Image (cartoon, rainbow, N blue to C red):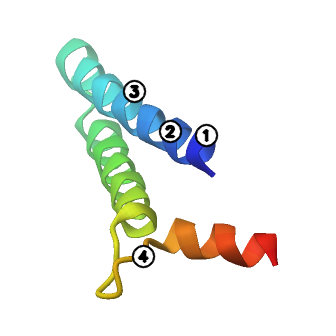
Amino acid sequence: MDFILSLVTLAAIVLMLGAVWLWRRHGQRKQAVLMVLLAFVMVVNVLIWTLPDSGGQALRDRAAAAAEE
């Protein structure tokens, strides 16, 4: 699970860099904005999986515990 979350985070960073490159070099605003939006959604998904809830346990921890049972 950690590997997947790391890949998603790296992909979001690459998408942001690609969006900046597209906007500056080619002036393609629509595609750049869509890439930024996708990167934002990916970061929010990583946060949902990693931030602890009121009980102090993250969603990925609960998923790992359920997989062990």
For the residue pair 9 and 41, the one nearer the viewer reads as 9
As rendered, which of 56 and 40 lies closer to the eye?
56
Residue at mark 4: 57
Q: Earlier in the sequence, mark 3 or mark 4?
A: 3
Mark nearest the camera among 2 and 3 is: 2
Q: Picture coordinates of residue 50 (x, y %)?
A: 41, 61
Q: Is residue 69 above or below residue 19?
A: below
Q: Is residue 57 above or below residue 8?
A: below
Q: Measure how far apart labels 2 and 3 are at the Cα level.
A: 12 Å
Secondary structure beneath disc 4?
A: loop
Q: Where is residue 2 drawn, in percent x and y?
A: 57, 46
Q: Which residue bears the numbered disc 3?
A: 14
| Cα distance in 3D space between marks 3 and 1 | 16 Å
Q: Earlier in the sequence, mark 2 or mark 3?
A: 2
Mark 1 crowdedness (10 Å alpha carbons): few <14, some 14-19, many ≥20: few
Disc number placed over residue 27 in the picture, else none: none
Residue at image location 39% in from the left, 69% down from the top: 48
Report the residue marked by disc 1.
3
N-terminal-most mark, 3 or 1: 1
Q: Residue at x 61, y 40 (%)?
A: 3
Q: Nearer the viewer, residue 15 or 29?
A: 15
Q: Amino acid at mark 1?
A: Phe
Residue named by callout 2: 6
Confirm or deny contact between disc 3 and disc 1 (CB under 8 A).
no
What amino acid type is highlighted by mark number 4?
Answer: Gln
